[in-house]
Amino acid sequence: MSVPTWERIVGNIGVIIVLLLIGGGLVWLFVRALRGKEVDRRVVFAFILISVAAPLLLTITFEMKPTHIVQELYDKIDNLPAGSRILLSFDFDPPMAPEVQPMADVVSRHVLTRGHKAVFMTLWATGQAQFNITLEDVIRRQFPNAVYGEHYVDLGYKAGNEGVLNVIRTDFKKMFPTDVNTVPWDSLPILEGIRSCSDFDLIISLGGGKPGVKEWVLFVGDPTGVPVAGGVAAVVAPMLYPYFPSQMCGLLGGIKGAAEYENYFRDNHPDHTDMETPAMIMMGPQTVAHVVILAFIVIGNVLFFVNRRKEVKR
């Protein structure tokens, strides 16, 4: 049984104090609303500030059960036999990184944990820098025994958008004769036997723009029958839901999808309980702030009906 650290005890006390402060304040405002007293807008701003800042400062997180569409991607990776070939395309840039980078990290961690062979590439010039973050923070730091060229490989960026997909659908080597370090294709053991996208067991596109998940589905997944999954910014996710489950085998939508995946992966892999969970941390202020906003909507409606009742009595 682990002994709680002093920092954790202090943190838990801080969390309790903040939640009591916010909860007590909302009850006080609710009572004022029942008495028909107005709430100054500065009080509302102060509550939103506290509800956003406190979870970030105290690292308040909440347990999240994966939704069906997230669970499907997790199960797909988990159920593939060890040594399966998975293609991961980092199709995003720094503005999308706050939402997409956490899911790129946790999905890459899951792929390597299960002993699959990971082939990384990108259709976006900015995607190479985003992959380098995963390479340093996840692969090299947490999988020191993973050998480049045997367990994973970086093919880098190739210009051409959908044109690249049309070529690698039938001839991968024609578009990527070397990896990102100009090592010849035939010198990399992990690429042995791969001629086209049809030789992969799963394709995962991480992004939110064009080309992205939709193009991978239309130009590669549908013609070849290879399962395609994705992780995208929240604003794009609703446009991709119609492709699930017939044309996509899973989707992470925004920071919430990433947080669900992080939570589920950590719970099912005890050797990763201490892993970083940036998506879950970002969901803390979102959750508390939304609860506070909903509370203010209720208080505002109560105040409206109380005042109208007073006017009717007059």
Image: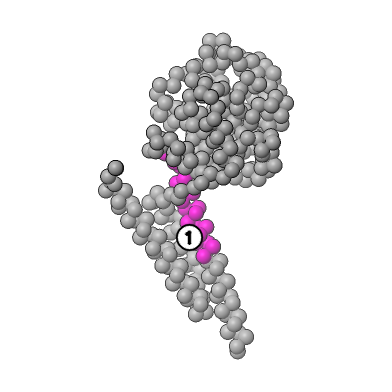
Q: Nearer the viewer, residue 148 or 128?
A: 148
SS under mark 1:
helix
Locate residue 139, reporting x and y percent: 45, 27
Q: Quadrant of the C terminus?
A: bottom right
Q: Nearer the viewer, residue 181 or 294?
A: 294
Residue range (magenta): 276-295
Residue drawn 46% across and 48% down?
63
Q: Nearer the viewer, residue 82 or 211?
A: 82
Q: How is the image coloured?
A: one colour
What kind of residue is marked 1? Ile
Locate residue 1, reporting x and y percent: 29, 42
31 on left or right of 2: right
Q: Main secondary structure of the magenta part?
A: helix
Q: Which residue is mark 1?
A: 48
Above-or-below relation of 57 to 143: below
Locate residue 221, reporting x and y percent: 68, 28
For this orientation, the residue located farthest to the bottom is: 314
> Which image quadrant for residue 179?
top right
